[in-house]
Image: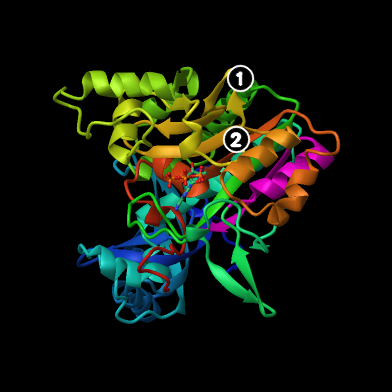
Amino acid sequence: MSKKTVSIIDVKNHVGEEVTIGAWVANKSGKGKIAFLQLRDGSAFFQGVAFKPNFIEKFGEEEGLAKFDTIKKLSQETSVLVKGIVKEDERSKFGYELDITDIDIIGASTDYPITPKEHGTDFLMDNRHLWLRSRKQMAMMQIRNAIIYATYDFFDQNGFIKFDSPILSGNAAEDSTELFETDYFGNPAFLSQSGQLYLEAGAMALGRVFDFGPVFRAEKSKTRRHLTEFWMMDAEYPFVSHEESLDLQEAYVKALIQGVLDRALHALEVLERDTDLLQKYVSEPFKRISYDEVIDLLQEHEKDADADYEHIERGDDFGSPHETWVSNYFGVPTFVTNYPAAIKAFYMKPVPGNPERVLCADLLAPEGYGEIIGGSMREEDYDALVAKMDELGMDKSEYEFYLDLRKYGSVPHGGFGIGIERMVTFVAGTKHIREAIPFPRMLHRIKP
Ligand code: ATP
């Protein structure tokens, strides 16, 4: 049998032709003269149909019967090279099926643990290496891929250069309680929890820059939005205002959603994601509202029937229920700007005339997906940054390179970081972040 194969997702270009597909048998049914195979090849699933009389006609009684018998006995996840004629099939969601004309077994599969019945999450997570083969998990990975592709495309089109921040770091960027420490030839080193500080150096050297890589946070909280290893994309740009920075973030998030609609529509259909909602997020402007206005709103509505959150005092950080309510209230992704300086990072620039608030924004996704972006303008003034670090009792010797950026031609600059898995979860419409990364690492999960 010819080894030149076509992908299932491409069979629409081969209607009426005989093609060869390299696939795995996801499921099997049928009786008597007919066998149905659910075939999976990583691009999509579709049905192959084998009809006994056709095999006898093509191969003769003995060989034809043997081939048909092989098909009937195929077990779940056997890998095969299957040959057949592509037919349109209006009854199936996918729209096509394969009239099987020949089959070769490539690799046997015995007692595959994940059967079509329901399994518990722990069992599926223990078998993550196999669970990835299922329809929904495959769709999640296709959406992740579309988001990564759209990220590179967007930044390339907007004049950014990819600038890779290190993963091992000799100092702690923000809150050291969340850092994973490791031994670096007898000295402590930390796994990066954000590339931002290094990216600022990149912005002063190259202008618009972005990085994209794994970051690590020893998150002790067990929530459906937190991983201990996740992929973060940071962008940093000089000579911008806060408003311009928000414009760029909005354009980027819209490009990601559009990128998934363009490149992974089939995956969205598999997940039964409401694509009208996604279209709405692309076409309508995002909401922008200040922290103080959100506090007013939350306090005003706290007795409402749908207000599933606790009373919040001005100055406090939001919990997930607050974020969920706010973004649902507006129904579109919402930038909450100008948080209290006391609950944000040391490098954020104060709002002119209001040192209690900083020029920052978190982007909250609607439908309860929570924060997907954290960004800010960075303090560019050397003296102001030193004063802030002193106020917080920080060890300035650890940040010499960072302070240097304010000594030699400092400029207004800002940037943001997005957790790719949060974005995948939101676009896919999946509630738990563990399905947005191939092998999730969480508080109680580091295998497989
Ligand atoms: P949160 O308050 O939700 O824990 P954060 O304020 O610590 O987030 P930032 O430091 O601003 O988040 O990080 C930027 C982005 O990285 C977040 O907007 C989010 O998309 C993502 N992110 C942060 N922590 C995690 C995590 N533990 N797992 C997955 N993504 C994360």
Q: Residue at x 71, y 49 (%)?
A: 198
Q: Whole-percent x and y of residue 437? A: 46, 57
Q: Amino acid at mark 1?
A: Pro
**Which residues make up the magenta segment?**
194-217
Taking the image as shown, residue 401 lies to the left or right of residue 191, namely: right
Q: Which residue is mark 1?
A: 352
Residue 199: say if magenta.
yes
Taking the image as shown, residue 63 lies to the left or right of residue 306, namely: right
Q: Which residue is mark 2?
A: 348
Q: Nearer the viewer, residue 302 or 41?
A: 302
Ligand 1 within 8 Å, label 1 CB = no
Vertical arrangement, residue 104 with respect to residue 313, above or below: below
Taking the image as shown, residue 73 lies to the left or right of residue 176, namely: left
Q: Residues within 10 Å of mark 1 (few under 14, many from 20)?
A: few
Vertical arrangement, residue 382 with respect to residue 39, above or below: above
Q: Nearer the viewer, residue 184 or 386?
A: 386
Vertical arrangement, residue 151 with respect to residue 413, above or below: below
Residue occupying the far right of the picture: 408
Element type at marker 2? loop
